[in-house]
Image (cartoon, helix red, strand yellow):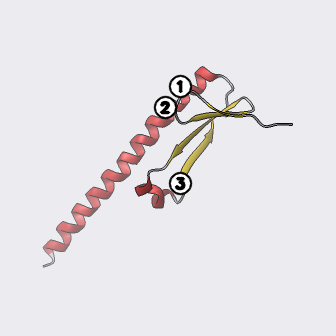
């Protein structure tokens, strides 16, 4: 039995034995937050059109999540700077 792995014609997706998957590399600056370098999920479908919609939805979700984590870090840094300035 051979396993068929195939990169799809759109980013962040691939198939294995007909089942579609999502994969996104975690940006280097956020890897410590997630404690891993990528996120992989089975999409639970063999339908390419449905997989593409799910991949697009997950891509937006994770891109927004990455942005949110970065914004929170920036806000924490600003608050910490202000707090340390108030103490002097």
How many other residues sit within 10 Å of disc 1, few (<14), some (14-19) or many (≥20)?
A: few
Q: How many marks?
A: 3
Assign a secondary structure to mark 3: loop
Q: Secondary structure at mark 2?
A: helix
Q: Are marks 2 and 1 in contact (CB under 8 Å)?
A: yes
Residue 69's place in the image compared with 32, above or below, is above
Q: Quadrant of residue 79 in the image?
A: bottom left
Quarter holding residue 14: top right
Disc 3 vs disc 2: Cβ atoms closer than 8 Å? no
Which residue is pictured at 22% across the width and 61% down the height? Answer: 78
Q: Quadrant of the N terminus?
A: top right
Q: Position of residue 48 (x, y in %)?
A: 62, 23
Mark 3: few, some, or many residues within 10 Å (few <14, many ≥20)? few
Q: Residue furthest right?
A: 1
Q: Position of residue 40 (x, y in %)?
A: 60, 44
Which residue is label 1 attached to? 53
Residue receiving disc 2: 57
The quarter of the displayed image where residue 60 is located: top left
- Residue plotted at (24% across, 67% down): 80
Direction bottom: furthest residue: 88
Residue 70 higher or lower than 50, as above or below: below
3D distance between C-alphas at marks 2 and 1: 6 Å
Q: Residue at x 52, y 33 (%)?
A: 11
The image shows residue 44 at horizontal and vertical percentages of 67, 32
Q: Which residue is mark 3?
A: 37
Mark 1 falls on what kind of element? Answer: helix
Residue projecting furthest to the top: 49
| Label drawn at residue 76 | none
């Amino acid at each position: 039995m051979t396993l068929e792995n195939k990169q799809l014609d759109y980013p962040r997706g691939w198939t294995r034995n007909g089942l579609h998957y999502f994969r996104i590399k975690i940006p280097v600056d956020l890897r410590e937050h997630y404690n891993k370098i990528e996120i992989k999920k089975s999409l639970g479908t063999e339908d390419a059109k449905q997989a593409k919609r799910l991949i697009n939805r997950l891509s937006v979700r994770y891109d927004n999540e990455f942005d949110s984590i970065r914004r929170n870090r920036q806000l924490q840094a600003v608050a910490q700077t202000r707090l340390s300035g108030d103490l002097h």
